[in-house]
Image (cartoon, grey):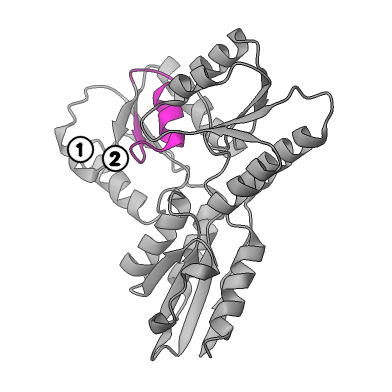
Amino acid sequence: MHIIKLNPQGYCGGVKRALKLINDALIDQNVKKPIWMLGNIIHNKNVIEDLTKKGVRCVDSKTKTRYEMLDEINEGTVVFSAHGISPRVFQKAKSKGLNIIDATCPNVYIVHKNIIAHLKEGYTVLYIGTSSHPEAEAVLELDERIIFISSISQIDSLNINNKIYVTNQTTLSSYDIKDYFNEILKRYPNAVIDDKICQATTQRQKAVIEQTADLCIVVGDKSSSNSQKLKTVCEKNANIKSYIIEDETELDKSWFAGINTVSITSGASTPEEITDKVVKKIESFI
């Protein structure tokens, strides 16, 4: 069995920046302690466990917004995750007297900036994203006029008599998003389309599409949007069977029966050392 490690691997730039900020804060005696993550700073369970062992505390909830979760933090430093935060949450943290470290990915803030600019210019803004994802949550809190699109079927019910600006969550499938854009343009041919799938996501999905393996293993957290999209792109667009695993312990030897070539890809928040362990475990099956 031949093993192919697809590139790129390891952290994207936004994740590297976020982790550097929080690790630097841990060793900086001038940073108020304790240090809190408002939601997981990145979507990777192994990384979060490592940070908590170092003393970082985390407030996370599947039913509460970032604004609501902030009620649980009353001292020290709060770190905003790479997925972005709304001004409303920022102001609440500031009013509570918390020290703030903003680890928002710069690419996400570009989306915020562009949306606000187009709203000021009188556009109706359509934002394509995943329900309950923290990146989408932050965007939707920017302005109540933003129309959230999480499925193509919602486009049929739109009735807009205004100029339209369309943008999206940065971690979606670059292939699925085209279907959304095309459907919007059918109804609103003059809509301004601003594809904001980040480069790291696009490159990984492109590598998955261009491969010729019999099986693909995606190494990434189950809660990671960009990791889940790699699996979707692999199966839907490349027609290659795929499994998503968080680490080597989740591998099943039976998956590889009759497989001649297996490829390994990983999400943008997956440490490369975990992917390397996955490769070694697969090698032991040969």
Q: Give the side of residue 52 with respect to residue 209, left or right.
A: right
Asked which quadrant contains residue 56, the reply is top right
Q: Mark on residue 74? A: none
For mark 1, give the secondary structure. Answer: helix
The amino acid pointed to by label 1 is Gln
Label 2 and label 1: CA atoms lie apart by 7 Å
Q: Which residue is mark 1?
A: 154
Q: Which residue is mark 2?
A: 150
Q: Is residue 133 magenta?
A: yes
The x and y percentages for residue 119 are 41, 19
Of residues 27 and 179, which is closer to you in this image? 27
Of residues 273 and 167, which is closer to you in this image? 273
Q: Which residues are magenta?
A: 126-145
Task: Report if residue 214 is visible in the image.
Answer: no
- Neighbor class of circle 1 (other Cα within 10 Å; few <14, some 14-19, many 20+) is few
Q: Residue at x 59, y 67 (%)?
A: 275
Looking at the image, which residue sits at the far top?
A: 95
